[in-house]
Image (cartoon, helix red, strand yellow):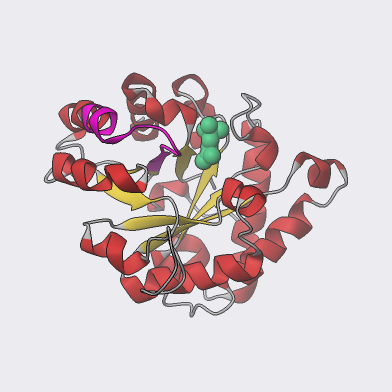
Amino acid sequence: MTTSASRRRPFIAGNWKMYKGPAEADALAELLKRSLTGQAQVDVAVAPPFLSIPIVVARLRHSGVHVSGQNLHPEPAGAFTGEISGEMLRQAGVAYCIVGHSERRALFGDTDAVVEKKVQACFRAGLLPIVCVGETLEEREGGQAEVVVRRQLAAALGRLTADQLPSVTLAYEPVWAIGTGRVATPAQAQEMHATIREWLAERYPPFVPRGMRILYGGSVKASNAAGLLSQPDIDGALVGGAALVADEFLGIVAAATA
Ligand code: PGA
């Protein structure tokens, strides 16, 4: 099942990972603000490291560019040394939060169960979750890509009602394409995006698959964005490395408006 991409507003999100301390983050945010203030065709968000969030929120105020967390703790507060809650992000002016990024899954023990708790925590705190799913190279080569993605979707979204789902953005990020320069072809990405939309269509009323945005992530650059974004089930991009360079990121936003 595919529905027209034109019904969904494109969404480009930049994940700055552990780059850009406050001064550098402010400088990048200023460049984005200059170019993006007033554009109304694409939703844009950036996810700076926690420490840089306040300065980026202040810089991007009234620009229309939203700020996202990269992660959150499932609990609202408590004796969890080194952690940040969704409530704190919300208080700091954050609108979105990435959940289940493959680096969190692979390096920091974010299992499917943890991802599900973090999705719930986003709703409790009033944050819009950007939920990442995607298979490793080994899983793809073993013919397991769809099984893995379906399992991750079932775990992450399992306790949400149909009415909650349009607040969720999904991001398909094949692990083998993240930070490797090895981008999925538009056809490969479209195939999995269509599978994800079918998965939604099998379980929820039509407004859910029709309305939910599914971003592609993994080595997206200004030069390859147009091919990916022209696919009917690709509604935007979650961008890592290229989001650290203003012109690259702006080029991806421009590709989404084309
Ligand atoms: P990349 O990262 O664009 O550097 O591949 C994408 C991501 O991790 O979200």
The one nearer the camera, 148 or 193, is: 148
The one nearer the camera, 102 or 33, is: 102
Q: Is residue 235 above or below residue 1?
A: above
The one nearer the camera, 211 or 132, is: 132
Quadrant in the rendering for residue 46? top left
Quadrant in the rendering for residue 201? bottom right
Q: Position of residue 106 (x, y in %)?
A: 66, 49
- Left or right of 109: which side holds 80? left
Residue at (52, 55) in percent of width and height? 3
**The stretch drawn in magenta includes residue 17:** yes
Quadrant in the rendering for residue 217? top right
The one nearer the camera, 52 or 233, is: 52
Q: Position of residue 114 (x, y in %)?
A: 58, 68
Residue at (68, 45) in percent of width and height? 191
Specify start and end residues of the magenta stretch as a single range.
12-27
Q: Residue furthest left?
A: 62
Q: Is residue 135 above or below residue 97?
A: above
In the rendered image, is residue 44 in sight?
A: no
Q: Is residue 76 above or below residue 186?
A: below
Q: Residue furthest right?
A: 142
Q: Position of residue 37 (x, y in %)?
A: 16, 36
Q: In the rendered image, which quarter contains the N terminus?
A: bottom right
Residue at (81, 47) in percent of width and height? 139
